[in-house]
Image (spheres, grey):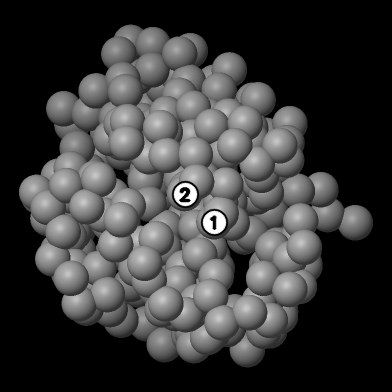
Amino acid sequence: MGSTSRYASERMMLTMWSAPRSRSTAFERMMMERGDFTVLHEPFSHVMDFGSATVLDHQVTSEKELLSTLKESPGRVFFKDTTDFHYPELLNDKPFLRDGVHTFIIRDPREVIESHAHLNPEVSRDDIGFARLHEIYDAVADATGEAPVVIDSDDLIDRPADTVAAYCARVGIPFDADALRWQPGTPRQWQRTERWHEAAAASSGFSRPPRQYARTVDNDPRLAEYHRYHQPYHQKLWEQRLRLV
């Protein structure tokens, strides 16, 4: 991958793709704590959901404009984004897929579905996002000729230092143990979608707050159908996960 030289250079585009409700916002908070990357919050989904996103002091209003702005960004940039939307321009932009360091985070789809339905009772099957996440994974693998890095968010919760250290080694950035802890609060970038990030905003590190939901995969036929549809895509990504020693 030539990862060490990537970090040694002045420019690096590091991304994390995630189905919604997969703990990617907590990972993003850790990247903010590091301080060595400009961190962008969900620029693709903001363009799709709100019609615009602020990216490095630029207001972009389309997926194509966003890709162009990201390609021209100086320095080291990290962004995470979610796959409750479809990104056709991204999937067709092989130079962007090839030249960035695209990584992925996954979570048990049962937990994802129940958490998502709690916040959005009208959630659709495709909003859950694992099929689209796998689609991006395949596009990156095709563009780069390499298997992208996938981390399991359960590993991130259970073994945060080991998981982040292994991730950093794979993508070629230094591991910063101090960034595993932070002060609770809502960063400015999260305010547009604040209600989706309450757990991450209240956190001071990677944790698993106990949650129980009235609607579950076991008692709601619609959620059960979503689980049947997305489980195979999650399984394929889980099989490619970063294995911890």
Element on which disc 1 rests: loop
Q: Residue at x 41, y 87 (%)?
A: 183
Expressed as whole percent of the image width and height from the top left, the position of residue 184 reads: 37, 82
Left or right: residue 79 versus residue 166 is left
> Which residue is labeled 2 in the image?
96
Q: Amino acid at mark 1?
A: Gly
In the depicted structure, whether residue 34 falls above or below residue 131: below
Q: Residue at x 58, y 17 (%)?
A: 232
Residues at marks 2 and 1, CA–CA distance in whole angstroms: 6 Å
Quadrant containing the N terminus in the rendered view? bottom right
Numbered circle sitting on residue 39:
none
Expressed as whole percent of the image width and height from the top left, the position of residue 22 reads: 46, 47
Expressed as whole percent of the image width and height from the top left, the position of residue 93 reads: 42, 39
* Of residues 55 and 40, the one drawn nearer to the viewer in this rendering: 55
Quadrant containing the C terminus in the rendered view? bottom right
> For the image shown, how many numbered marks are present on the structure?
2
Pointer 2 with pointer 1, Cβ within 8 A: yes
